Image (cartoon, helix red, strand yellow):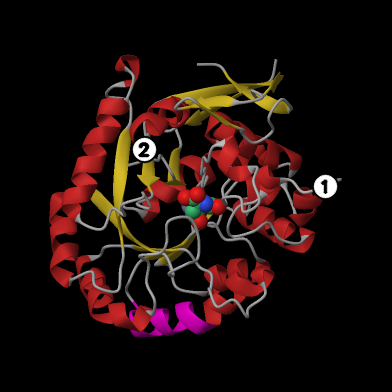
Amino acid sequence: MIQLTLIRPDDCHVHLRDDNQMCSILPDTVRRFARAIVMPNLKLPVSTTELALAYRKRIYSALPVAMKGHFTPLMTLYLTDNTPSSEIIRAKESGAVHGIKFYPAGATTHSNSGVTDITKCYSTLETMERADMPLLVHGEVTDPETDIFDREKIFIDKVLIPVIKRFQKLRIVFEHITTKEAVEFVKETSNNIGATITAHHMLLNRNAMFNSGIRPHHYCLPVLKHETHRRALIEAAISENPKFFLGTDSAPHSKFTKETACGCAGIYTSHAAIELYAEVFEQANALEKLEAFASFYGADFYKMPRNKDTISMIKENWNAPAQIDFSGEALIPFRANEVVTWKMTD
Ligand code: NCD
Ligand code: ZN
């Protein structure tokens, strides 16, 4: 039996949703991860410290009894054109907020209240830089003229480089990177710039959206890319460069809202999150590098202590469920009814 034991990982980018939907899916994350950076794109955006603290309370209440005390949600605020500097100070002082999420308006799910022009936020970014509060970036331009596959690459030049030039000490996480340009950019910039990489962007290329027909459950944002980019992401993840770390971007939507004429973006991977990363690293002959990517580099970037307890997996095939209950609706998880090759043992 092949067994793999790791220091317990952290998920540096996850969508836990809210209320009953959250109750349905939260155990998947908690079973695997000690902590998670929780995205603030609820229907009512989590744009203040007060809302973040209330959301954190709801997350703690949603934890099943046996899991209480085993999970720490790390909250984020949703940046708007009008987020005042005083809100950043409040967030920092709360000790509960670990990043401020920048969604370009219209870029993705629930981003309508996002930033229309980042220069409007420059005084807020200055406060973040001074307070050492990280900026978490959904890195895609949104103008409809730009080809959807080029949105990340163009965002680097148009938005990220000017921000980095102006705020040289601001810590930035380039979230869920999907292109070789983003990998190169992160590698070349200073140590205060990191990036998360999802399992699905390393397991699939864009063909997976059109495999004998349209596959709505493989549609996410940023959209899956060409094979050359997928390979660049794997190279980055196994490179032992501490700037690259685990963030699942697990983003559940009901089957009903994905299998429709205008389906939502998001892939749900929390039910097999660390197992899927193990597949990627094993296929790349780099299993021994998984622990640092999953459990050390994210914690280091966020200046948190590394976890102490461990998780174990064995090499054993199991089928991901065909569907998962999502507050009375069906959620189709990644690899639904298909084989996952690593299995959690505890
Ligand atoms: C996310 C969601 O559904 O909240 N969707 C996705 O495709 N990743 C939003 C996001 O992170 O872009
Ligand atoms: Zn996300």
Q: How many marks on residues?
A: 2
Q: Which quarter of the figure has residue 135?
A: bottom left
Q: Residue at x 41, y 79 (%)?
A: 164
Residue 89 at x, y percent in the picture: 14, 63
* Vertical relation: 147 (above or below) 39: below
Please state the horizontal and vertical placement of residue 219, each as a whole percent of the image: 65, 51
Q: Is residue 280 above or below residue 317?
A: below
**Residue in front for this viewpoint, 13 or 232:** 13
Q: Which residues are magenta?
A: 158-168
Position in image of residue 196 (x %, y %): 51, 55
**Residue at 68% of width from left, 68% of height from top?**
149
Identify which residue is drawn at 44% across, 73% down: 190
Q: Secondary structure at mark 1?
A: loop
Q: Residue furthest front?
A: 261
Of the residues shown, which amino acid type is indicated by label 1? Gly
- Asked if residue 161 lies in the magenta stretch, the reply is yes
Q: Residue 126 lies in what quarter of the image?
A: bottom left
Closer mark to the observer between disc 1 and disc 2: 1
| Residue corresponding to mark 1 | 213
Q: Main secondary structure of the magenta part?
A: helix
Foreground residue among 130 and 323: 323
**Marked residue nearer the N-terminal end (1 or 2):** 2
Question: Is 231 displayed left or right of 201 in the figure?
Answer: right
Q: Name the amino acid type tagged 2.
A: Arg
Residue at 18% from the left image edge and 53% from the top image edge? 49
107 left or right of 200 in image: left
**Does residue 96 show up?**
no
Q: CA distance from mark 1 to mark 2?
A: 37 Å
Residue designated by label 2: 35
